[in-house]
Structures are given as structure tokens and as C-alpha cells.
Image (cartoon, coloured by chain):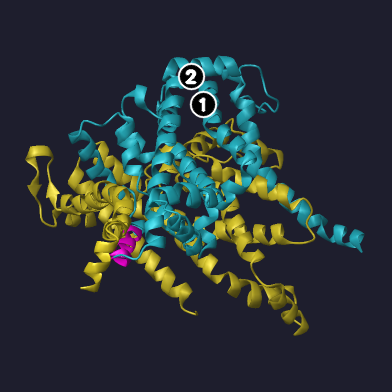
Chain colours: A cyan, B yellow
């Protein structure tokens, strides 16, 4: 019986293996290419085993775009934005889920209504605002507009609605203030949701492109995707190895993180879908 | 009288009550402040800007001029057409593929399902810029790895980034590579939520696998299908990163999208009024598309 099942599944298993191959092959090619000499990137037939020029490529990249600096910018912006958005969403979600107050429905609907507005609508006024505040080319320019994430607030509200009121009341009866209740009751229980949400926020921030492209023009302040796109877009640029090494630096950390935190990634990215 | 007496007996109580009343607003303050300044204000300011022309101190009222210009602007229509073409091919192909993939990932006959699920999801965690740069090399006409593979199975070299038709297909290909696994995992979650009894009942009624797919699987997945269709459509209407990195809108504006045209007008020509009008036209399209799809697909419930 099991043998029959196994045979029946063979074609389908092979098909899925092939599709997985198509998904993963470009990454393999990226690793191979990031370690090649410039002249070998476009070798024909393509190189299929990694070479020994990764260090050289990274050095060129450091020379051209200041890899260390740019990587630091990306990390700082993504870290600050994730932390800020997480705290704001937790507090707001807690208010919406556990308090009855005037304006609750209206405010919640107002927050969610902006989900249908494309990000592009905000670009011009945000640019003018940051120019007026002299905040262009600063971390604040990117972090501040990313602090209020309606979807994250929605998600926190959903998760917190499931939390029994008795649990909170027990702590309140013991004389704990609201912040104390949040810190020692809500946060520990919500840890899986918070982890998934952090991953979602961090990934989004790490990969964001249009707004940083507009607001960060000083090469010293740029994030990795902006620096990469700029270097790649220069017609005269022939640092293929360096560009691909930079691409690997941008893609691989997220992949490693994904392999380590699969569950948080998948539930974080699917959170909106499964709730319907 | 009795409340006053009560208050005198426990003076802490009214203060606690006010505190409790204020608490939700205090908790909401950071969200509402950042929302007002960095979301609500820009959305409204953009609407006002779309009725102006010039910039800085030289900003003047322009009535509907920007919108009129939009309707007569061949490049805007080109951008809209390109976006529509990419959407019409990409969304159905990707979601169809994702559904098949999900059925495979959910099949009890398939071995090592967790491995395949992990593999196909991987592109989704890669940034679009990294994806675009990577594919700009892979799709090179003379020496790209994809044409080498195609050559290996006897197919001619494709001018992926150099011909208008193939450049659009290249954008479709890259988007499909990036998002298919993500959608498949969404569908998989939906498939796993369908009660087994429904399939058993259908089998008792003599329904074959195809019949079961159409009369059990599809209706049960309807809300999730709707969600992915709307999400992918809205996302594709705002397409920017992939063509910006891959083709810069070329060749011959074949992959110029509405968002790229907005960016060009706003941040190359600094024509803020016109860019805002494009942004609001895009919003209108997004809202209309979303509403129509919800209506069409949500109808049966």
C-alpha cells in the first residue's frame, strides 16, 4: 500500500522538486556570480561553481558605495522602524481591543481606510514636508512615515481581542497600572504574534525602495537597495561582480533569517490572508 | 448624594475612573499623531496639490488643468496600457500556478512537502531591488544564464530586455518568480482549513477528483481567492521597483508604468501638481478595480 502511494506521488513530487529548483536556482547563480571575477560574470557557458573573488568584489563595492556605511544605514532604519511601529501598534491595538470609548469605531475605520490609498499618493507631500523640516537625507525621513502601520494595528487588535479580560482584571485588582498590565501580562502572552509582526515589519523596511530613493540622495545616507539600484543604473558601471556581491549581501541575510525563523516569517507574511 | 458619600469614603476612586477613561486615548496618542502627520496630512495635501501648478512660493491654483492634461497625455496612456497589459497576463498566470502548487503541496502522495514549501517561498523574502538586479543579469540577451538554458533545450536566444514585447514578459516573469510561492502558501493554509468531511461526502456522492475540486475546493477557497486577486491587482497597479531596476521603463517606454511616470514627473521634473494628479488618478483606478473585484467575486456569498 505504502509503495503504491509512493509511486503514485512520484510524478507530483518530481514536479514540485522542479518548481522548487526554479525558485532556488537564481539564488545559487547569485552566490556563484558574487564570487566571480568581473570578466567571468558573463562567461559563456555560465560558471556553475563558486569562484574565489568574493572579497575582491566586496572591496570594490566598499570603494564605490561605502558598503559598510550603507549596510549600517539599512540596519539602523529597519531596526528603528520595526521597534517604533511595533510599540505603536501594540498600544493602539490594546486600546481598540480592550477599551470601550467614544470614537472607537470611527478611529479604527479611519486608520484602516488608508489601506486602499496607494503609497505613491503620499510621496510628494512627504518630500515637501521633509524638505521644510530639513530632514531629507536623514534616518528620520524614512523612519517617521513608517511608524504608523494600520495593518499592524489591525493585526494587534485581532490578536488582543482573543485575550481573556479576566487575565487583565486579575492583574488590575492586584493594583497594577495599565502599563504594568501591558508589560507583565499582555506582552508575554503575545510574544509569538509580536515576533511574527516584527519579522513582517523588518522585512518590509529592509526591502523598501521608492521612498528612500526619493528622500535619501546623499550617498552616505542611502540604504542598500537604493545604493545598489543607483550603481546598477549607471550606464558606465561595469563592476558586475561588485553589484552582484551587493545583491547577495542584501538578499542572503533575509534568507538565513527566514530559514531560522520559518514559522514567524510565514505567519507574519500570511497574517492578513488567513484572518480573511 | 450617595455618589458623593462614596467618593468621600474612597477618594482614590474618581481619579482612577478618569484615568481609566483617558487611558485608551493615551494609548492611541502615538498612533494617531503619526497617522495624522505622516498619513492623513499627505493624503489631503496631495489632493490639494493636484489642483495647483508651479512650486514653492510660485504655487498657483490651476483648477482641473492637471487632470485635463492627464487625459491628453499620450505617455500617461502608454503607462496605463503597459500596467494593464502586465496585470492582465501576470495576475491570472501567477495565481493559477500558485493554486496548482498549493494542491501539490497539500497532496498526501507527495514526499518532503516541507522542503518544497520552504523552497518556493524563498523568493518572497528577497527584496524587489535585489530581485531586479539579479534578473537583469540572468536575462541578458547574449550571455545571460536563462538564454543559455533555453539554448540547451534547442530554443533561440530571447531578447528579454531589448524588445518591447519581451521586456513586458520579463517583468511578468520576474513578478511571477517573486510572488507565486507566497500566494501558494496562502492557498495552502486555506486548503488545510477545508474540513475532510466535505470531501468524504462528495466522494460518497460519486464525485471524481475534478468534480471535487470545482464543487468543494474552489467554493471553500473563495474568500482567500478573492483576497489574493485583490491584493495582486492592487500591487500590480502600483508596479514600480521591478521595471525601474530591470528596464528603466524601456525599451521605447514599453515597461513604463503609472507609478514610474508619477516618479518621473514628481522627482525628475519636480512638477508636484501634475505628479499629484497622476497619484489621484492611480488611487481612483485602484479603488474602482478593488470594488469591482469584490463585487464580482464576493457576490455569491
Taking depth in this image into account, of B248 and B53 the one nearest to the observer is B53
Instruction: Please rate how many residues cluster around mark 1, counting C-alpha atoms within 10 Å: few if below 14, some from 14 to 19, many from 20.
Output: many
| Residue that mark 2 sits on | A61
Q: Is residue A146 left or right of residue B91?
A: left
Instruction: Please rate how many residues cluster around mark 2, counting C-alpha atoms within 10 Å: few if below 14, some from 14 to 19, many from 20.
Output: many
Marks counted in the figure total: 2
Residue A95, image quadrant:
bottom left
Q: Which mark sits nearer the N-terminus, 1 or 2?
A: 2
Mark 2 secondary-structure assignment: helix
- The reply to whether residue B74 is visible in this rendering is no
Q: Position of residue A176 (x, y in %)?
A: 42, 51
Reply above or below: A78 against A17.
above
| Residue that mark 1 sits on | A246
Reply above or below: B299 against B6.
below
Examine the structure image and report whether residue A15 is included in the region drawn in magenta. Answer: no
Taking depth in this image into account, of B164 and B230 the one nearest to the observer is B230
Amino acid at each position: 500500500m505504502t509503495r503504491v502511494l509512493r509511486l503514485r506521488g512520484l510524478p507530483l513530487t518530481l514536479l514540485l522538486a522542479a518548481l522548487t529548483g526554479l525558485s532556488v536556482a537564481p539564488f545559487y547563480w547569485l552566490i556563484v556570480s558574487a564570487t566571480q571575477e568581473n570578466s567571468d560574470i558573463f562567461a559563456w557557458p555560465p560558471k556553475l561553481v563558486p569562484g574565489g573573488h568574493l572579497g575582491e568584489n566586496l572591496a570594490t563595492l566598499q570603494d564605490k558605495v561605502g558598503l559598510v556605511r550603507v549596510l549600517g544605514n539599512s540596519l539602523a532604519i529597519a531596526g528603528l522602524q520595526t521597534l517604533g511601529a511595533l510599540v505603536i501598534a501594540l498600544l493602539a491595538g490594546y486600546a481598540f481591543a480592550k477599551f470601550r470609548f467614544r470614537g472607537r469605531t470611527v478611529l479604527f475605520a479611519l486608520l484602516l481606510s488608508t489601506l486602499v490609498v496607494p503609497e505613491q499618493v503620499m510621496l510628494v507631500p512627504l518630500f515637501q514636508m521633509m524638505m521644510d523640516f530639513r530632514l531629507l537625507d536623514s534616518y528620520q525621513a524614512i523612519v517617521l512615515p513608517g511608524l504608523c502601520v494600520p495593518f499592524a494595528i489591525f493585526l494587534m487588535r485581532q490578536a488582543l481581542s482573543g485575550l481573556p479580560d479576566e487575565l487583565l482584571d486579575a492583574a488590575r485588582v492586584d493594583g497594577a497600572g495599565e502599563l504594568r498590565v501591558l508589560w507583565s501580562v499582555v506582552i508575554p502572552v503575545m510574544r509569538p504574534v509580536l515576533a511574527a509582526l516584527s519579522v513582517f515589519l523588518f522585512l518590509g523596511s529592509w526591502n523598501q525602495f521608492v521612498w528612500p530613493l526619493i528622500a535619501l540622495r546623499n550617498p552616505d545616507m542611502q540604504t542598500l537597495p537604493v545604493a545598489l539600484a543607483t550603481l546598477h543604473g549607471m550606464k558606465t558601471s561595469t563592476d558586475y561582480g561588485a553589484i552582484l556581491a551587493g545583491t547577495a549581501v542584501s538578499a542572503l541575510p533575509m534568507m538565513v533569517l527566514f530559514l531560522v525563523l520559518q514559522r514567524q516569517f510565514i505567519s507574519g507574511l500570511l497574517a492578513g490572508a488567513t484572518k480573511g | 448624594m450617595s455618589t458623593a458619600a462614596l467618593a468621600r469614603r474612597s477618594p482614590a476612586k474618581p481619579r482612577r475612573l478618569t484615568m481609566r477613561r483617558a487611558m485608551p486615548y493615551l494609548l492611541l496618542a502615538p498612533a494617531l499623531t503619526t497617522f495624522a502627520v505622516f498619513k492623513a496630512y499627505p493624503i489631503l495635501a496631495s489632493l490639494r496639490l493636484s489642483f495647483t501648478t508651479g512650486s514653492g512660493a510660485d504655487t498657483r491654483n490651476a483648477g482641473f488643468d492637471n487632470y485635463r492634461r492627464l487625459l491628453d497625455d499620450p505617455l500617461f496612456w502608454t503607462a496605463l496600457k503597459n500596467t494593464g497589459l502586465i496585470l492582465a497576463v501576470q495576475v491570472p498566470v501567477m495565481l493559477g500556478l500558485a493554486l496548482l502548487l498549493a494542491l501539490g503541496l497539500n497532496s498526501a502522495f507527495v514526499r518532503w512537502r516541507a522542503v518544497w514549501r520552504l523552497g518556493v517561498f524563498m523568493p518572497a523574502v528577497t527584496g524587489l531591488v535585489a530581485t531586479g538586479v539579479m534578473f537583469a543579469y540572468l536575462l541578458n540577451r547574449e550571455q545571460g544564464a536563462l538564454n543559455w538554458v533555453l539554448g540547451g533545450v534547442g530554443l533561440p536566444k530571447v531578447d528579454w530586455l531589448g524588445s518591447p514585447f519581451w521586456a513586458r514578459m520579463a517583468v511578468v516573469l520576474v513578478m511571477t518568480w517573486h510572488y507565486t510561492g507566497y500566494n501558494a502558501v496562502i492557498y495552502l493554509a486555506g486548503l488545510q482549513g477545508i474540513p475532510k468531511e466535505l470531501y468524504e461526502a462528495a466522494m460518497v456522492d460519486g464525485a471524481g477528483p475534478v468534480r471535487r475540486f470545482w464543487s468543494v475546493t474552489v467554493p471553500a477557497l473563495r474568500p482567500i481567492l478573492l483576497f489574493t486577486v485583490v491584493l495582486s491587482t492592487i500591487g500590480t497597479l502600483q508596479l514600480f521597483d521591478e521595471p525601474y531596476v530591470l528596464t528603466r521603463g524601456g525599451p521605447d517606454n514599453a515597461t513604463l508604468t503609472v507609478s514610474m511616470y508619477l516618479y518621473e514627473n514628481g522627482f525628475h521634473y519636480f512638477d508636484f501638481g501634475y505628479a499629484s494628479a497622476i497619484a489621484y488618478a492611480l488611487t481612483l483606478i485602484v479603488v474602482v478595480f478593488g470594488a469591482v473585484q469584490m463585487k464580482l467575486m464576493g457576490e455569491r456569498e
